[in-house]
Structure formats: C-alpha cells, structure tokens
Image (tube, helix red, strand yellow):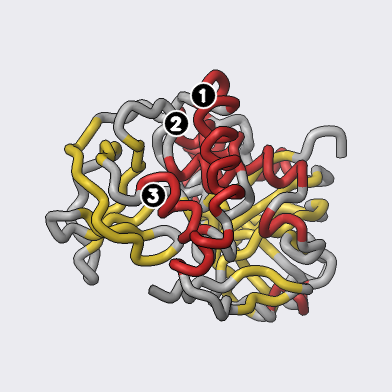
Amino acid sequence: MTDTQPWFDRGRWVRPRWTTTTAMANGAGFCAGLITLAWAASVPSWAACTVDAQGSGHVGAIVDGRTLRLADGREIRLAGLAYPVGPHAAAVLAALVGDRDVVLRGQDDAPDRYGRQSFYVFPDGAGVSVQAALLARGEAVYSGLVADPGCAAELGQAEATARTARLGVWADPDAIKNAETPGDILALSGQFAVVEGKVVSVRQAGPTFYVNFGRRWTEGFAVTISGRMMAAFEAAGVPPRSLENRRVRVRGWVERHGGPRIELFRTGQIELIAGR
C-alpha cells in the first residue's frame, strides 16, 4: 500500500516514493522507539483527551497517514490532525495500532461524503491518543479545530514538543511561514499552513474583524474572525483587539482575497507566542 501523503522538503510539499510495507520494514527500530516515547513518557502530562467512548474495533488496515480501516469495514479519520502528514506517519500508525483493538472517542458524527468517521483513536488500554503520538514525533500537524478543551490541550502540547525539538515536519525551516512574506503564504493557497508574525493592526468591517500582519491590507497577510465568534475568543482570553503589537502563531487553510487570508473558526487556531 503506497502512502501518498506529502511532507515538507526544502520549503515545499513533496510526495513519498516508498510504500508503507517497505517503510515499516526499514523503520522497525524507529517505530519501537516512538511507541516507548508516546506511551511511557507522554502519559503523565498528556492524558487529557477523555471524551466519551463511541465504541471500539479491530484495525484491519492502514489507509494512509491519518486514516485507518477497521475489520468491520468502517474507515476512521484521525480527528484533530491537518492534512498533510509526515513521511513516516502511515508506518508509525501501523506500528501503533496495526492489527490491534482500538477505542474510538469523540462525537458520534455522521460519516463524511466518503463514508469516513472522525474520532480520537486509542489503542486498547492506552491513556494517550494515536494523534498525540504522531504529533509528538512531528509526523502530523495539529489542526486547531478541536472543541473539547482536554483533547485540544493534549494535541497542542504534543505538537509543541515536536516543534520545539524540530522533529519530523518541523525540521524544515519553512514549515512555519513568516507573516512578513505574503508571497510565500499565497503559494499555499488552498492548503493548510502555520504562520507566525507580529500583528500590526486590528480592524472591524461590518461583522468581521481583520487581524492584519501588514500595513497594506490589500496585499499583506491577514486573519479574519467572524463576529459570531467574538464571545468564544473573549472567553478564551484572546479578544481580537488585544492582539495588536503581539506576536502570534495561527493555523488554517490559506485563501486569496487580495493578499493571503486565514479564517479562524476555533480559538485553538491562534496562540500568543510568549516573550515576543
């Protein structure tokens, strides 16, 4: 089975040319080390995603780096992860849950148009999600679109560990885009991106707030926040107007509206960068 998920390489997303089977064979020691890291070292601080269980199943196959197929035919997407994932994600996922029983946690949502359901996946008896294990090794990127505070904290902390250590996708210096170079961000139009920069101004136009990172709003990078999200951002301690002159990290899907834009749907898509 070929894993066709792209990953960062020298500032761009590329696709692997190896198969999951080959990667698993060559990476047995790597995967064993990851399992030790994720379920031994990580449990004390990250066992926070305790949303309701929605059943269980036995993993029959790994579809790609963030999708698995249960023996009963159900396809499960790993909730909380953004596309794309790292080059070893499918092999790691196979090492963690391949041919194992798993517990599914989250909301019992209807399948998407491809018949897939999104859940947090836990190997039977484990206290930390598979998502956290992938994030901790830099084989995935946190989407920021997680409603449950415990799960959001677990996934955010796991990614921060890999990001600080420059593991996996974070080893590439271009993995985080600079808000002062809007052209680089526009190159990712239609894709998920993580962007850091200093907020120059915050303006409101109708019901929408514009968090601007450039002085020319028609060309520079900006984040948009709908008025209906104001209560949530204020409750989280990040009202838009408080962001002026602060350095922040944002994540989401890049759109072109003059300059590059990312719309925020959850408070987890933006975070203050301490000390900057």
Q: CA distance from mark 3 to mark 2?
A: 14 Å
Label 3 with label 2: CB-CB less than 8 Å: no
Residue 104, position as x, y percentages in the image: 26, 40
| Residue 207 numbered tag | none
Going by the numbered disc 1, the residue's amino acid type is: Val
3D distance between C-alphas at marks 3 and 1: 19 Å
Q: Who comes first in sequence, dot 1 or dot 2?
A: 1
- The tag on residue 43 is 1
User: Residue 174 in the image: x percent, y percent?
Assistant: 78, 66
Q: Horizontally, is 116 left or right of 247 in the view?
A: left
Neighbourhood count class around disc 1 (C-alpha, 10 Å): few under 14, some 14–19, many 20 upward: some
As measured in the structure, the alpha-carbon distance from the residue carrying label 1 to the one carrying label 2 is 6 Å
Which residue position holds label 2? 128
In the picture shown, does residue 7 fall above or below 209?
below
Q: Would you say the residues marked 1 and 2 are in contact, meaning their CB atoms lie under 8 Å apart?
A: yes
Q: Position of residue 90 (x, y in %)?
A: 46, 60
Q: Amino acid at mark 2?
A: Val
Quadrant assignment, res 162: top right
* Callout 3: SS: loop
Identity of the residue drawn at 29% across and 37% down: 105
Instruction: Describe residue 259's horizontal placement relative to residue 205 as left or right.
Output: right
Task: Point out which mark residue 79 bears.
Answer: 3
For the residue pair 247 and 241, the one nearer the viewer reads as 247
Label 3 close to label 1 by CB (< 8 Å): no
- Give the vertical position of 154 relative to 111 (above or below): above
Q: Secondary structure at mark 2?
A: loop
Q: Residue furthest left?
A: 72
- Residue occupying image coordinates x 76% and y 76%: 184
- Side of 93 relative to 275 (left or right): left
The residue shown at (71%, 59%) is 195
